Amino acid sequence: MRILITGGAGFLGSHLSDKLINQGHEIICMDNFFTGRKENVAHLVGNPKFELVRHDVIDPFKFEVDQIYNLACPASPPHYQYNPIKTTKTSVMGAINCLGLAKRTKARVFQASTSEVYGDPTVHPQPESYWGNVNPIGRRSCYDEGKRCAETLFFDYHRENKVDIRIVRIFNTYGPRMNPDDGRVVSNFIVQALRGQDITVYGDGQQTRSFCYVDDLIEGFVRLMNQTETVGPVNIGNPGEFTMLQLAELVLKQIGGKSKIIHKELPADDPKQRRPDISLAKKYLGGWEPKVPLEEGLKHTIAYFKTQV
Ligand code: NAD
Ligand code: UDP
């Protein structure tokens, strides 16, 4: 198949490109390089099955493709809050442009949604049936509401125009090729520990997240895209739940060094807890479940960051 990946030079997009190229597909990797990096896909440039296109997903585009994965959107809070209006436009206009292309070409189209659609959840763990608890006017809203609106557009194109959609709700994912300046917690803690800097835990560090290793997530993406039982949304993540203090301690245990844990102010609207209910993924994705525990995934990720800092 010929497959378009928007945001293909980012952390997740580059791993997805690798997997699909290895399966023999042709990839068009489209990116505006806001947070993505050419070095993430440098090893694919020159491969006749790989095309790298600089383009912004908010501007219309035309390709002849069989499948579309829409991943374009900055994912870390400092990056998506840098230009919040652009972030909303990226999610909304990007979804419209991908859906328009899918409608014309009859391509199947996949949306990278997020656990952020659950906001600061009052139901725990979060099943797909939970409608969420999102502040519509806060600092995280450009991302959360942009992704929620993208889901709305996907379902309306599906109902009105019979567009063949898939929606994944991704829970915190980490691994090699995260940008050292990304600003999300796993890369921050590892980079800080490798540099001998203090580890910045926001708030009291009792808030929780559930961390999925990138290989497990990408396997789930491809399974979701290629099955016909459900259009989603389907949660994909690792239900292992950790406080940020526990994560800091795990990183320090593996890296050692002199870093101390310090506390910084908790950002506004920071969700207190997050853990996926993955029953639907297990049911529809051919027995999929995450295989890589946090300690092991951290080991691979630390090895990568040692080459970067
Ligand atoms: P990332 O920042 O590494 O990748 C995003 C990519 O999109 C980058 O290559 C960036 O340059 C590109 N991009 C951003 N705006 C664009 C635009 N307007 N036009 C074209 N390209 C644009 O982040 P990631 O972790 O790889 O996230 C990929 C997708 O998965 C995002 O949509 C994100 O919201 C979603 N997601 C990721 C996680 C996670 O934990 N990694 C969790 C939930 C959702
Ligand atoms: N966090 C932290 N120190 C950091 C970066 C993040 O303690 O240097 C916390 C953040 O406040 C949040 C959690 O780690 O509670 C996960 O943050 P991240 O930005 O990785 O993802 P998200 O909040 O979008 O799940």
Image (cartoon, helix red, strand yellow):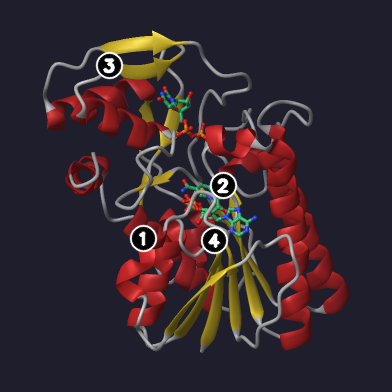
Q: Amino acid at mark 1?
A: Asn
Cα gap from disc 1 to disc 3, whole angstroms: 28 Å
Please give left or right for residue 110 compared with residue 10 in the image: right
Query: Along the polypeptide, which appears first: circle 1 or circle 3?
Result: 1
Pointers 1 and 2 in contact (CB under 8 A)? Answer: no
Where residue 73 appears, x then y in whole percent?
60, 52
Placement of 235 over or under 5, stated as above or below = above
Q: Which residue is painted at 51% across and 39% down in the image?
A: 76
Density class for disc 3 (Cα within 10 Å; few <14, some 14-19, many ≥20) is some
Mark 1, ligand 1, within 8 Å: the answer is yes
Q: Could you tell me if residue 189 is visible in this image?
A: yes
According to the image, label 4 marks what residue? 7
Placement of 145 over or under 206, stated as above or below = below
According to the image, label 1 marks what residue? 40
According to the image, label 2 marks what residue? 74
Q: Which residue is painted at 70% across and 53% down in the image?
A: 91
Mark 2, ligand 1, within 8 Å: the answer is yes
